[in-house]
Structure formats: structure tokens, C-alpha cells
Image (cartoon, rainbow, N blue to C red):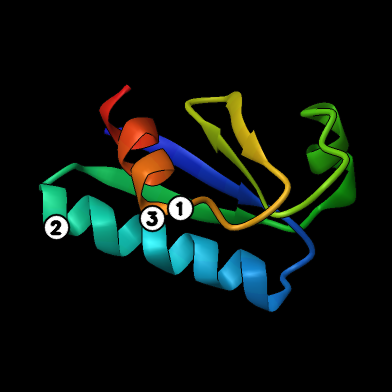
Amino acid sequence: MKKIEVLGTGCKKCTVTAEQITAIAKELGTDVEVTKVTDPQVIMRYQVMSTPAVAVNGQLAHSGGIPNREKIEALLKA
């Protein structure tokens, strides 16, 4: 199971990012645990300067906007 964290303040873009990751993972049959992280201290540990950002298994994989479908699929398959 992949642990995916959506890092951000809880804005609409962060919510959409989490929803899209969950939906695409379900379509692909990928077992994921998606959590939203809004704690600024946790976000800063990833050195994120622009949100929403996505961490996969503790590694920053995307930041600065809603990832497109191709990016999400790549994150799920990596």
C-alpha cells in the first residue's frame, strides 16, 4: 500500500488533488492511503514552497498545483 500525503492549507485545490488521487487509484486498482496534511510544521519538513504538494511514502513527489492525470498515474505506478 502506498501512503500518499496531500500537503496544503486545506484549500479547494488541496481537496481536489486528494479526490483525484483517490479516484484514479481506485480506477487503476492501486491500494493507497490518502491523507491531507495541513500542519505547517509538517509541510515545511518537506521544504514545500507552493501547495498543493504530494508526498508518496514520505518523499516529496509534486508541488505547486493540482497534478494532471498523467502525473498522478506516474506517482501511483512508481
Residue 9's x, y, as percent?
Answer: 79, 64
In the rendered image, which residue does mark 1 sit on? 68
Chain-order first, disc 3 or disc 1: 3
Q: Is 16 above or below relative to 71?
A: below
In which quadrant of the rendered view does residue 72 lie? top left
Q: Residue at x 48, y 61 (%)?
A: 18
Q: Residue at x 18, y 57 (%)?
A: 26
Q: Is 30 above or below relative to 57?
A: below
Residue 71's x, y, as percent?
Answer: 42, 40
In the rendered image, which residue does mark 3 sit on? 21
Chain-order first, disc 1 or disc 2: 2
Q: What is the crowding at mark 3: few (fewer than 14 residues within 10 Å), some, or many (at least 20)?
A: many
Give the Cα separation between the discs numbered 1 and 2. Answer: 15 Å
In the rendered image, which residue does mark 2 sit on? 27
Please, what secondary structure does the residue beneath circle 3 have?
helix
Give the Cα separation between the discs numbered 3 and 1. Answer: 10 Å
Residue 50's x, y, as percent?
Answer: 82, 47
* Amino acid type, mark 3: Ile
9 or 73, which lies in front?
A: 73
Number of numbered discs on residues: 3
Q: What is the crowding at mark 1: few (fewer than 14 residues within 10 Å), some, or many (at least 20)?
A: few
* Amino acid type, mark 2: Glu
Which quarter of the rendered picture does the C terminus lie within? top left
Please, what secondary structure does the residue beneath circle 2 have?
helix
Chain-order first, disc 3 or disc 2: 3
Please, what secondary structure does the residue beneath circle 1 have?
loop
* Amino acid type, mark 1: Asn
